[in-house]
Amino acid sequence: MRTLKQFLDTYAESHQNPLNQWIHMVCVPAIFFATLGLLWLVPIGRFIPGVPANLAPYINLATVFAVLVGLPYYLRLSLGSLLTGTIWALLSFAGIAAIQSHGLPLGWICGGVWVAAWIVQFYGHHVEGAKPSFADDIQFLLIGPLFVMQKINRLLTTGSIHPTTH
């Protein structure tokens, strides 16, 4: 498996255009959230014998994916990646729970966000003149959040999402 640095360097190759980078800063979190929201709607806890009724609603494709795929994947990359993935998942789950607690239509909200964010992402790649990284390797769908965190860290420390040049 490639290292985190190799993944981020490869991802960055098709994300050089400043507009595309900003689009990703907004749309990657939106897609991450919306994807988990849509997966949340597929309950599986009630079909697992022995799962207490009060926990069953929280065992769905989103939580199973996060625990069995996302978190182990990020852990293989680094502890920082695991922390990032965990925080993103927990924030997403909190937002999902908030939407549901207010009786809002989670499926329609997440479906609309998911479609709109992908349209904008593909526009960003059109501007970039490069195909999305996941077209070559689906693992890049999980690298996007790490790329965004790298940009956020740079923004907080330097005031810019772009690397400084000397």
Image: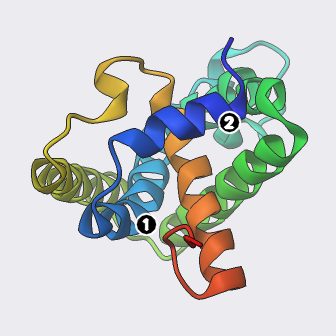
Give the total number of marks visible in the rendering.
Answer: 2
Q: Residue at x 62, y 29 (%)?
A: 6
Q: Which mark is residue 40?
A: none
The quadrant the C terminus occupies is: bottom right
In the drawing, does residue 98 fall left or right of residue 89? left
From the viewer's perspective, is 19 left or right of 10? left
Q: Is the residue 162 above or below the residue 114 in the image?
A: below
Q: Are marks 1 and 2 in contact (CB under 8 Å)?
A: no
- Residue drawn at x 59%, y 23% is 44
Amino acid marked by disc 1: Met
Going from N to C along the chain, the mark reached first, 1 or 2, is 2
- Residue name at image x 44 percent, y 71 percent: 103
Q: Say which quadrant the N terminus sits in.
A: top right
Q: Residue furthest front?
A: 166
Front residue (pair 137, 60): 137
- Image coords of residue 99 (percent x, y): 48, 69
Which of the 4 image quarters holds residue 131?
Answer: top left
Q: Nearer the viewer, mark 1 or mark 2?
A: 2
- How far apart are labels 1 and 2 at the CA level? 19 Å
Q: Secondary structure at mark 2?
A: helix
Q: Secondary structure at mark 1?
A: helix
Q: Which residue is mark 2?
A: 5
Q: Position of residue 145 (x, y in %)?
A: 56, 50
Q: Which residue is mark 1?
A: 25
Amino acid type at image mark 2? Lys
In the rendered view, would you say 141 is above or below 31? above
Quadrant of the image occupied by residue 23: bottom left
